[in-house]
Amino acid sequence: MSDILFGQSYYLRFDEKLWQAMQPYPPLGTLYAAAVMKEHGYDVALFDAMLADSTSEWEAALAHHQPRFAVLYEDNFNYLSKMSLIRMRQAAFEMIDYAKKRDCTIIVAGADATDHAEAYLRQGADYVLLGEGEATLVELIGLLGKTPKPAEAELYAIQSIAYLHDDALVKTPPRPVINDLDSLPFPAWDLIDYERYRRIWRERHGAFSMNLVTTRGCPFHCNWCAKPIWGQRYNSRSPLNVVQEMAWLKANFQPDHIWFMDDIMGIRDDWIEEFADLLDDHQAHIPFKSLNRADLLLRGQTIPALARAGADIVWIGAESGSQKILDAMDKGTRVSQIYEATHKLHEHGIKVAFFLQFGYPGETREDIDLTLNMVRELMPDDIGISVSYPLPGTPFFQRVQRELARANWYDSQDMAMLYQGPFATPFYRQLHTVVHKDYRSRKAWNELKQVAKNPAQWRGHHTRQIASMIYHRATLPLARRKLDELANIPHQPTEMTTPVQSA
């Protein structure tokens, strides 16, 4: 028996596109919460949904561990959790049902539960943790361990929880976030079947990647970006604490690669420089990918320090090649900075990838073409494409919420235009196809030209590249014609107006 069985509701198996990509990472936010509860003396177990086939495996875990507390603690560092995908919410509700049948006390934490606490409570959860959950979970389980049915006044004294009292929703006052992130224990990696992860990564990609975070939150004001967990606050671990964890991971798990899951890594330029210095001192280098802003990359020694630290690839939230759209998003960056940062990263041997976002209010075909031209001219090493997604709590959501036929995608490949955007959903799904055909064929051609200069570099996969390039090039004209046809579907777009200010 265990005191607490932790789980989360992101099942890779339920997200077909990412199941095919097969780049699984354990639920880091869940592992932090588990580590904190272990530190407070609780017997803790974990059900890792990431590689599970169905929610019935959660039922089996409940039967095996017989926990008093079933805690669905979502990985708040995973952007897919923040998107609140419908399929994963369905999974969470199924998991609540299973735990309810076992008479567990059910506690739920995560972005979707924070935004829709009452829905989770009506489904059967006993408590919802609002926002950052570790300190709240310690206090709540501490109370419930002493008093299974505490008085309402005792519950209300715990900050940042939601519960039902006399069938009415109660939300307690908010709790300050944790400022000293170095005070947290390292994630409870011992609860994970990391050998299974290692095997999958090496079979599919030839290298084992693990995940890690250096920060919590983001202080910037992109008006489409939701911040249900940390709000506008931003806290960072010390460079030494991060390096110590990397050295520990290297000694215990020997990863070939690290994904830093931060919204933005290294907002302070001196942080990355100190980080690089300490990695040198501790011989703790592991190649990594990170997310950064174009403007922050252009400070002083930031890019050279990233190169020295071992950055393999940097993902930039480029979003658009149109300055008009970046300004409408309150992005705070310039298209020229995307160009400059890309050139400088490549000069220092660091690969570059772009997040691209289409469908923001006011975007025209001309704006889309500016984005496509930016990709063709800069040829990043990878791209990720999405459609503007209205998330609760954002000025963007406030602007379009009356137009929402539904509020969430079913899974990550849904690509639905949820509001009355510039074009209809079929257009954006076809745009996704066109952009990838154009990009993949150009990327393959550039790589093959380099191999042609040195035939000794020829490998079997280059033959597949040729076949793929020919296919994409041959089918691209038809795909573009279909895109033009879909652009003419009758559709009333939302005008680009001044956003409603958040309360």
Image (cartoon, rainbow, N blue to C red):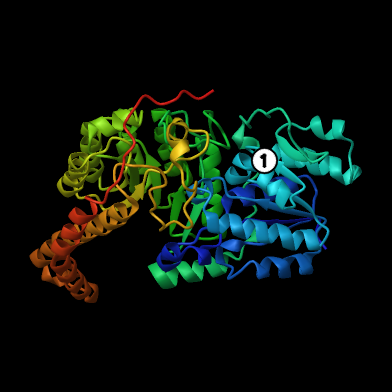
Front residue (pair 42, 148):
148
Q: Is residue 298 visible?
A: no
Tell me: 455 left or right of 114.
left
Tell me: 497 left or right of 30.
left
Q: Quadrant of the N terminus?
A: bottom right
Q: Position of residue 324 (x, y in %)?
A: 25, 30
Q: Quadrant of the C terminus?
A: top right
Q: Is residue 189 above or below residue 310?
A: below
Q: Position of residue 82 (x, y in %)?
A: 52, 45
Q: Position of residue 216 (x, y in %)?
A: 54, 37
Q: Is residue 47 visible?
A: yes
Q: Residue at x 47, y 37 (%)?
A: 401
Task: Write down the residue under mark 1.
Answer: 133
| Label 1 neighbour load within 10 Å: few <14, some 14-19, many 20+ | many
Q: Is residue 299 above or below residue 484?
A: above
Q: Position of residue 427 (x, y in %)?
A: 28, 53
Helix or strand or loop: what does disc 1 sit on? loop
Tell me which amino acid carries mark 1.
Answer: Gly
Task: Quadrant for residue 91, please give it.
Answer: bottom right
Front residue (pair 322, 272):
322
Tell me: 104 left or right of 332.
right
Task: Quadrant for residue 456, please give it.
Answer: bottom left
Q: Residue at x 39, y 52 (%)?
A: 416
Tell me how many marks there are: 1
Front residue (pair 364, 44):
364
Q: Is residue 446 above or below residue 270?
A: below
Q: Is residue 290 above or below residue 199?
A: above
Q: Outermost residue, front direction?
A: 490
Front residue (pair 154, 77):
154
